[in-house]
Amino acid sequence: MAEDMLAVDPDVYVTTTYGDDWQSIPSDEQSFESYEAGHLVDLILESDEENPLFKAPIRYKEAQILDIGTGQGNWAIDVADFLPQSTVRGVDLFPPPVTWVPPNCILEVDNILEQWTWNVPLDLIHMRGMTGSFEPHEWDRVYKQCYDNLKPGGWIEQLEASPYVLCDDDSLPADSILHTWGPNFTHCCIRAGRPIDTIDVMAGTMRKAGFVDFHEKEYKWPIGPWPRDQKYKEAGTAHYQHWLSGMEGWCMWLLTKYGAPNPWSKDEVTVYVAKLRAEIKNPRYHIYQRARRVWARKPFPEELAREASVKEEEETLDIDPLYIKQEPQE
Ligand SMILES: C[S@@+](CC[C@H](N)C(=O)[O-])C[C@H]1O[C@@H](n2cnc3c(N)ncnc32)[C@H](O)[C@@H]1O
């Protein structure tokens, strides 16, 4: 067994773990439910940490924090509770269905691609699950806006997952429909102009925007309660729920618009999701997704000045002032 392979709990069976009627919620609530379950996966996998919410080493007092694409605001609300002396803003295109937030949490409706109107320099900007939201040139703009709106020394942090369903021990049959999910989803997103490879390109795009001091953490997000380890079992149970409530919303629009070879009908998508759901319910399939967290810093002015002088020196060294062009000898 590979060293980083998750050990399997041999005592988990389909019928004792889940009923068949988990899914009975209308689709809009369904999305918010999926965000909540996704948040839980993230928290469980970081539950050994004193701060399970983010890694960026910001000061905890009076920090100004922004959560882009906050969804239901789960992360923003938890961070506001965790750092009561800080201010946490969550922004999304849609109003979150919450009736109460901590007094230091502000949930706003706005489009992050528009000109930013916050005039307080930020200590931390957080994003999670934003893959597929933007075209590549829009990502450049988002990271540039993040850079411009952070204080010198402020941090950006992003957590994204890969759409591919993986399995380390061949327990997922080769003809499983779950193998089609990653490629299907990836190609639909490419056709939609919003690639879903954010997990692999985000660090490079942040670097291009000027960020420095990069850190990364890799995760395996099990789908289902199959891992033996209790923490992974709990994460897998929450992630299973994340998939059940999220799947239809994740692919209905994409497949009915960009499905191959032609856009799919709604019924075709429903049948596809039902088949995926049936496979996901099988805990004999030891499946997981890859996820990655990246955090990086906006440089301080002295770092930028140092870098500029090194660059200038290199450019100067490129031209040899003693070089005299020799005429070719007759
Ligand atoms: C998959 S959800 C992730 C929600 C949340 N970050 C979480 O982890 O629970 C992506 C969110 O990004 C929001 N979003 C997409 N484009 C946006 C934009 N241009 N401005 C603000 N929010 C946006 C969507 O409305 C959606 O709520």
Image (cartoon, rainbow, N blue to C red):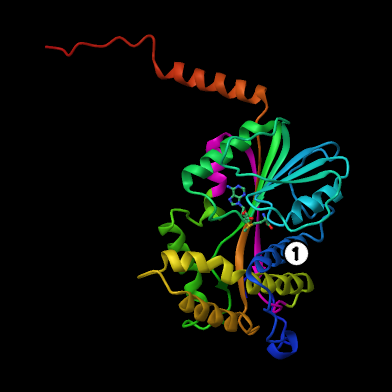
Identify the element where label 1 is drawn.
helix
Query: Which percent across, then down, holds residue 165?
Result: 55, 71
Assess whether residue 224 is covered by the magenta stretch.
yes
Question: How many numbered markers are drawn?
Answer: 1
Between 85 and 267, the one lying in front of the other is 267
Tell me what residue is drawn at x 58 percent, y 24 percent: 307
Q: Is mark 1 within 8 Å of ligand 1?
A: no
Residue at x 59% of width, y 84% of height: 278
137 part of magenta stretch = no
Quadrant showing the C terminus: top left
What crowding class fits label 1: few (fewer than 14 Cα within 10 Å), some (14-19), or many (20 or more)?
Answer: many
Q: Position of residue 298 (x, y in %)?
A: 65, 33
Q: Residue furthest right?
A: 84
Question: Could you say which is closer to the camera, residue 173 or residue 195?
Answer: 195
Residue 66 shows in the view:
yes
- Does residue 320 sit above or below 193 in this rendering? above
Question: Which residue sits furthest left?
Answer: 330
Q: For this view, does 259 lie left or right of residue 114?
A: left
Query: Compared with residue 53, is residue 176 higher up or lower down, i.e. above or below?
Result: below
Say which quadrant the N terminus sits in.
bottom right
Residue that carries the numbered disc 1 in the rendered image: 40
Residue type at mark 1?
Leu
Residue 201 image position (x, y, % from top left): 52, 50
Residue 111 picture location, percent across and down: 60, 44
Q: Is residue 3 visible?
A: no
What residue is rendered at 52% in x and 68% in y? 251
194 over 150 or under it: above or below: below
What segment carries the magenta color?
202-227
